[in-house]
Image (cartoon, coloured by chain):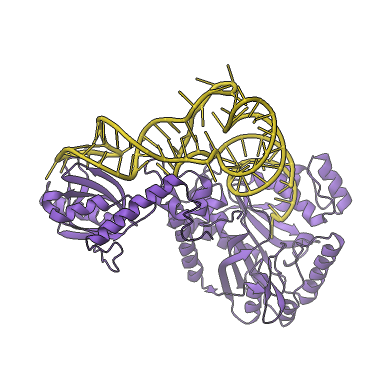
Chain colours: A purple, B yellow
Amino acid sequence: MPGPEESTDQPVSEARLIQARLDKLERLRARGIDPYPARFKPTSDSASARAELDSVESELGEGAKSESLVLAGRMMARRGMGKAAFIDLRDASGTIQLHLRQDVLGDEYELLDDLDLGDFIGAEGPVFRTRRGEPSIEVRSLTLLTKATRPLPDKWSGLRDTEKRFRQRYLDLIANERAMEIARMRADIVASMRRFMHGRGFMEVETPMLVTVPAGASARPFGTHHNALDRDLYLRIATELHLKKLIVGGFDRVCEIGRIFRNEGFDQDHNPEFTTIESYEAYADYNDVMEMVEQMVSTIAMEVTGSMIAPPDEVGGQPIDLTPPWSRLDLREEIKKRSGIDFVECDDIESLSAAMRERDIHVEPGANWGRLLDKVISDHVEPNLIQPAFLVDYPVEMSPLAKRKPGSDGIVERFEGFVGGHELCNAFTELNDPVDQRARFEDQERLRREHDDDEMDRLDEDFLIAVEHGMPPTGGLGLGIDRLAMLISGERSIREVILYPQLRD
RNA sequence: GGUCCGCUAGCUCAAUUGGCAGAGCAACUGACUCUUAAUCAGUAGGUUCUCGGUUCGAGUCCGAGGCGGAUCACCA
């Protein structure tokens, strides 16, 4: 973090802008005004004031004035005309104009000389409509609430520099209305999701982020160290195994909304820390989970935006219709249709690699079979799934935690949900056969060694012991909340839906 | 990690072939009692991301680095 005031490094012109504000600060103090008063209680806000004006006008007709209101906010613009002035006041509900007159305010009008754009001020007075029709506060009392000593970004052009927007998100929020809109939308999405899950009887829990075995997904973990125990720990890469142990413990519907961490690159679809919801429901299977996902996502979209139609995934593209039911597509058939590759025929690394090379799909040297097939899916299938769809029934090789599908050799009851050409969720009928689960983990460990792949899932003995005690039939889900926020807001970069995205130092 | 693009005043952006670094907003001084990107007159404000090189002369060309973005690879 930079020091408090790096005046020696500061460009001269910026230092002069700051000094001008500090000079005003001193003048104010000299006049006995506290530039940082401890308390101020607004009785209204800009949106309520506008509503109040509509209400008194409908009652008393044009030229009506409300009772006196008290508002507080940031001064965003000023238009001075000598003995009168207009100020645009921004608060959390919007913006309203203040009208200040020297003959009304008397000595308090001089306060204006020492105010700057960006200062927080409080104003008291009735709301009225100017001759030009602008709802305005006729200010009878003006109070400085907080002096800002740095200048704001340009009031008209806003803040475009992406680096500054992400590193100093508060400036983005102040300068760009869209930034605030997205942040609100994301908060609404999470709130709506909680209502939905709680309404379905899910108990929301919190499980450890610091773990001794980073298991439950294929990903490279962040490592850390516990000093008192002198022991290496990892940041969780999934919440899956802890939640399933709660199903073993007897809860039949649990979920967790929380941050997980994957030590991988970041780009417009990936951030090293991101948020998921995972849920586990006893006596449900993956068909029940599919139904829940389409209900949940469409309900959230409706509650947050008032529509089940999400913006197109690209400029000029088709709007995305989230209305249930979503298509169920057999994975094997879909891969065949899109790439001509049949993974049942290409059942070893050599034949699959050969089929991929024929189609100019990059074959990563040393990759295992599941990883290769995943590459085929992400190259040829995923980009075509614009309207919401579930890809259903995955090969067991790439799904170590999913239950085998009865009567289908080598296939598990797993699905992934895709929207706008991106993966949204991953779910399965959970594997609860402890002998099979142990064998699957051992396969993963073997693949890790043979392919030198440190992203393979890890054997978690505590989890295996729990499953050996008996986990009822369970349907589980993992869904990316950042991706959901991108979908519903129509933003193409994950950085726009994360308030503080990862950047280089 | 590869390739490409960008970085100029607090903010948004200009700068011709390598030839005096500019504008709008913000700031400062003054005028102005219904403006709303207020208006009018004036003033000031620069490590052109950093370091090195070529050149009489570099914002501009070359090399290295930093940060950001796009794309490819990787990361389900």
**Please, is residue A403 above or below residue A358 in the view?**
below
**Please, is residue B4 above or below residue A43 in the view?**
above
Farthest right residue? Answer: A350
In this rendering, position of residue A203 left or right of residue A71:
right
Q: Within the image, what quadrant is residue A23 found in?
A: bottom left
- Seen at 72% across and 62% down, the residue is A220
Residue A26 x %, y %:
29, 58
Q: Foreground residue, A344 or A301? A: A301
Q: Is residue A162 visible?
A: yes
**Please, is residue A77 above or below residue A197 in the view?**
above
Q: Foreground residue, A458 or A229? A: A229
Residue A424 x %, y %:
60, 55
Residue A270 x %, y %:
62, 54
In this rendering, position of residue A20 left or right of residue A99:
right
**Quarter of the rendering occupied by the N terminus of chain A:** bottom right
**Please, is residue B54 above or below residue A410 in the view?**
above
Q: Is residue A323 visible?
A: no
Marker count (numbered): 0
Q: Within the image, what quadrant is residue A403 found in?
A: bottom right
- Seen at 37% across and 55% down, the residue is A149
Q: Foreground residue, A20 or A159? A: A20
Q: Within the image, what quadrant is residue A314 found in?
A: top right
Residue A13 x %, y %:
42, 44
**Quarter of the rendering occupied by the C terminus of chain A:** bottom right
